[in-house]
Image (tube, grey):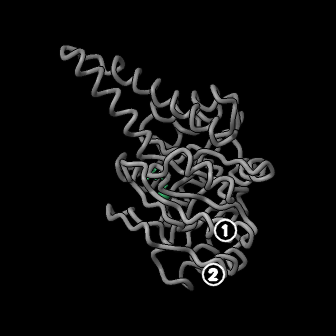
Amino acid sequence: MTLATLTDVLATAAERTKAVGAFNVFSIEHAEALVAGAEQAGTDVVLQVSQNAVRYHGALRPIGLATLAIAEAASVRAVVHLDHATERSLVDQAVELGFTSVMFDASALPYQENVAETAAVVTQCRAAGISVEAELGEVGGKDGVHAPGARTRPDEAVRFVAETGVDALAVAVGSSHAMTERTAKLDLDLIAELAAAVPVPLVLHGSSGVADDEIVRAVAAGMTKINIATHLNAVFTDRVRSVLGDNPAMVDSRKYLGPARDAVAAEVARLLTLLAS
Ligand code: G3H
Ligand code: ZN
């Protein structure tokens, strides 16, 4: 049993000015690949199930329980995290299933409402021994519209953490969700300013659009959790496309899903090694 809370793995990473990779689970193959990659790298890992993935499956329970079972069998520490939940009922389900962390995303609400909603989630999760990540400043791209211009104000971030009691904070510093080119330029001065002022670990969302060297600079400046989803989806799909392209008569789905899972595991191992180095 190697389930860990987000608070525990981020504390270990922050002590060493390193970061933990957090990757999204869309199917059981993704969860298996993320754990295999972390075991190859010998590092902690965060497996996240987003509200959008729950919508795709129609329920949290099947994909959530599969992810928990895979994480529990890992030989490294694995966090099972609910990602970008805007609905309280989903938080209730994650707590009940045994998730070790949730991200409650009320960043689209006005500041005071974001504080009130997030603080209530913290009270609930604290009682269950679960970590809470929240977002302030609204990282763009969740609705398909890239908005790398959003920024989190350090003074507001300090106040937000004090008023809510969150364990980690997602901040807007130049990345945007769902980019397929790794060309985002981060505001590294702002990351350093936020890291110096905010007493909890910072989270970089939309990291698929950030190149390796820029990720390394972001970690050095103070980012502790690096969220990557689209990039690994591209790795998975590229491999499926190439296997099927080479074998047009193939019908056994294990024969193209297996190589795709292996490709994701290798890229996860590479990314986790980069974040831990
Ligand atoms: O919460 C998930 C991440 O922020 C992933 O974003 O798909 O742009 O890497 P991405
Ligand atoms: Zn995100």
Q: Quadrant of residue 156?
A: bottom right
In the rendered image, the quadrant that contains the N terminus is top right
Q: Single out the mark in the foreground, 1 or 2.
A: 2
Percent x, y of residue 93 = 53, 55
Question: How busy is the neighbourhood of tag 1: few (under 14 within 10 Å), some, or many (20 plus)?
Answer: many
Mark earlier in primary sequence (1, 2): 1
Q: Which residue is mark 1?
A: 122
Q: Nearer the viewer, residue 269 or 11?
A: 269
Percent x, y of residue 49 = 49, 48
Q: Tell me: residue 146, above or below residue 2.
A: below
Please say whether residue 123 is visible from this viewpoint: no
Q: Secondary structure at mark 1?
A: helix
Q: Which residue shows up at 19% across the image and 17% down it?
A: 248
Q: Which residue shows up at 49% across the image and 65% down it?
A: 174
Query: In this image, 211 relative to 145: left or right?
Result: right
Q: Which residue is mark 2?
A: 156
